[in-house]
Amino acid sequence: MKRIGVLTSGGDAPGMNAAIRAVVRVAMYKGLKVSGINRGYQGLIEGDIVDMDLASVGDIIHRGGTKLRTARSMEFMKEEGQKRAVEILKMFEIDGLVVIGGDGSFTGALKLHNLGFPVVCIPGTIDNDLWYTDNTIGFDTALNTVVSAIGNIRDTSSSHGRINIIEVMGRECGDIALHSGIAGGADSIIVPEFGFNIDKTAKTIIEGKNRGKLHHIVILAEGVGRPYEIADVIEHKTQMETRVTVIGHLQRGGTPTAYDRILASQFGEKAVNLLLEEKSGLAIGNKGAEIICVNIEDAISKKEMPKKTLYELANILSK
Ligand code: ADP
Ligand code: F6P
């Protein structure tokens, strides 16, 4: 292993830059050369590749987004695109690849591994939707952004005595909704994994109002969908004015938290070490403070389930 490549793919996540920085700096410390591949698998297929050095990752640890940019590549979904990617990697004398992204990017990385190219994955997505790791890079930052938004909305919710429905991201996974709902003291949390009963939600809100509650915050996971329709039904059932906020991409950017920066740095170091040990087809993660790895195949084999116990706790605390 003389030269490794690094790319970011899929949805960007705060902390990806800290991971890129760690990959480059640890690799160089260990005597490797590093190529940065721009725009994920699409840039790889197009040979959009630059040499990285210590300075090229300076001043990025605190920045959201990804310096290498990112993309979703349809071309890479086809076998022809994957074979082209391997051809390019060999042409640029890259001996191993670090892929930073979510489950889609991991699926792509597995294809490269199956074609015999050494690859390891770092989980970078705000969704926290990978079951094998406690955290993905970006989750903690997104969570804090959402909690801060809930705080702001709670102020105006209390002033007007309204119901405020807040839709948060997470594609098919309710982790951001559940965790931010607990940290933000939401009155109701609706996630796709545990289903929901709109009558129960309306009843909880009315009971809260009767006890003198001024604010009524409902956190809705993106995977449930239809926030405006749900708001109309809740307004009708409670006879209370209801507003909707879709936080959207606000929660995808911003300066990464210290936690995400440290996690990203550790994941980056582990990725370089695995490639140096001539390991391939592995996904890095954490169990508490321990940095772990599993086969990519296992990593993408099942869905992350938000913790039922946390969901039950949220229901108790929101009373
Ligand atoms: P994320 O990595 O955040 O889950 P996506 O699901 O959009 O994001 O996947 C990112 C990219 O990974 C896709 O645009 C595609 O290039 C690649 N990818 C996803 N699924 C596959 C697949 N089944 N085969 C090959 N490449 C894939
Ligand atoms: O996977 C990260 C994520 O932000 C999801 O939570 C969301 O569903 C999706 O990406 C949005 O993707 P896009 O980049 O297409 O807006």
Image (cartoon, grey):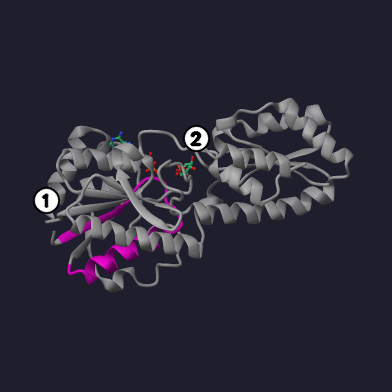
The reply to whether dot 1 and dot 2 touch (C-beta < 8 Å) is: no
Look at mark 1 in the image and give the residue it sits on.
Answer: 90
Position of 154 with respect to 280 (left or right) is right
What residue is shown at x 83% (from left), y 40% (from top)? 208
Confirm whether the magenta stretch covers residue 27: yes
Q: Which residues are magenta?
A: 3-31
What residue is shown at x 18% (from left), y 65% (from top)? 33
Where's residue 99, x and y in %? 29, 50
- State the residue in front, 69 or 317: 317
Estimate the spatial distance between the alpha carbons at disc 1 and disc 2, rounded to whole Å: 36 Å
Q: Is residue 284 visible?
A: yes
Position of 288 with respect to 229 (left or right) is left
Look at mark 2 in the image and give the residue it sits on.
Answer: 172
Q: Earlier in the sequence, mark 1 or mark 2?
A: 1
Residue 75 drawn above or below residue 20: above
| Residue kind at label 1, given as amino acid type | Lys
What residue is shown at x 53% (from left), y 53% (from top)? 142
Location of residue 264 by image quarter: bottom left
